[in-house]
Image: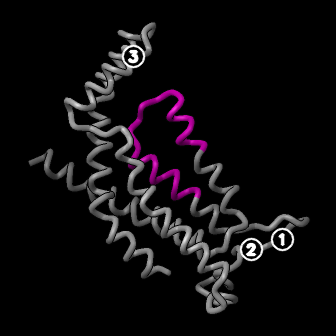
């Protein structure tokens, strides 16, 4: 599963790099976008046209950051299917508290409530990953970006631990990649 996560990360690396560049360009355009929002606050159609014009002129796709995630979804669903249906993975232990990759990683049950560690790790890594990679546009988008990991924790709470582990590993690899990019960018700026 770890090797699969690394391989899928390597395969999607060019798209991730392109996505990261797109988000950086979006971040650079934020002040101009805010000016357009103020200038055309009473004319939403005109504001949309001007924003699209600005995107075109700067060769920025506002949806560029979502593309790698969308391409990973078939792999995600295939992994889900494999974990649910595979006899080989049934009761397959991994490490530490993960005793069965085809079941949630419950470590403790308190009054009928299962405590699963991986969804908590995945949610924390999602928060950190979004903080490092998302353009701060403020407002409604910022609230949505903060709420999405909380929604994920409920979705993933009862999922097979192998699936949640895969998602958490993808987040961790993305965090490491983003930290490397940030470090390299600072080195270039200092030079």
For image coordinates 80% across by 68% down, the residue present is 114
Indicate left or right for 23 with 186 as reference: right
For image coordinates 55% across by 75% down, the residue present is 79
Q: Quadrant of residue 83?
A: bottom right
Q: Nearer the viewer, residue 10 or 186?
A: 10
Instruction: Identify the residue position indicated by label 1 in the image.
Output: 109
Q: Quadrant of residue 146?
A: top right
Tag shown at residue 189: none
Indicate left or right for 169 with 9 as reference: right
Earlier along the polypeptide chain: callout 3 or callout 1?
A: 3
Indicate left or right for 95 with 131 as reference: right
Q: Is residue 169 above or below residue 32?
A: below
Crowd class of label 1 (few under 14; some 14 to 19; many from 20; radius 10 Å): few
Which residue is farthest top? 42
Instruction: Identify the residue position indicated by label 3 in the image.
Output: 37
Which residue is farthest bottom? 88
Tag shown at residue 106: 2
| C-alpha distance separating marks 3 and 1 | 50 Å
Please, what is the dominant secondary structure of the magenta stretch?
Answer: helix
Badge 3 element: helix
The range drawn in magenta is 123-147
For image coordinates 37% across by 14% down, the residue present is 46
Q: Quadrant of residue 26?
A: top left
- CB within 8 Å, label 1 to label 2: yes
Crowd class of label 2 (few under 14; some 14 to 19; many from 20; radius 10 Å): some
């Amino acid at each position: 599963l770890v090797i699969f996560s690394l391989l899928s990360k390597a395969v999607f690396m060019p798209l991730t790099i392109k996505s990261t560049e797109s988000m950086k360009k979006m971040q650079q355009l934020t002040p101009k976008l805010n000016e357009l929002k103020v200038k055309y606050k009473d004319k939403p159609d005109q504001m949309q046209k001007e924003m699209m014009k600005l995107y075109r002129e700067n060769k920025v796709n506002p949806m560029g950051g979502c593309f790698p995630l969308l391409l990973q979804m078939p792999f995600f669903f295939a992994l889900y299917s494999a974990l649910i249906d595979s006899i080989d993975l049934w009761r397959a232990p991994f490490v530490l508290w993960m005793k069965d990759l085809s079941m949630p990683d419950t470590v403790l049950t308190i009054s009928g409530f299962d405590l699963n560690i991986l969804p908590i790790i995945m949610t924390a890594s999602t928060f950190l990953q979004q903080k490092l990679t998302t353009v701060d546009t403020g407002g409604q988008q910022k609230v949505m970006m903060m709420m999405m990991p909380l929604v994920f924790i409920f979705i993933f709470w009862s999922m097979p631990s192998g699936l949640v582990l895969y998602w958490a590993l993808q987040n961790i690899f993305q965090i490491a990649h983003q930290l490397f990019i940030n470090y390299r960018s600072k080195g270039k700026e200092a030079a």
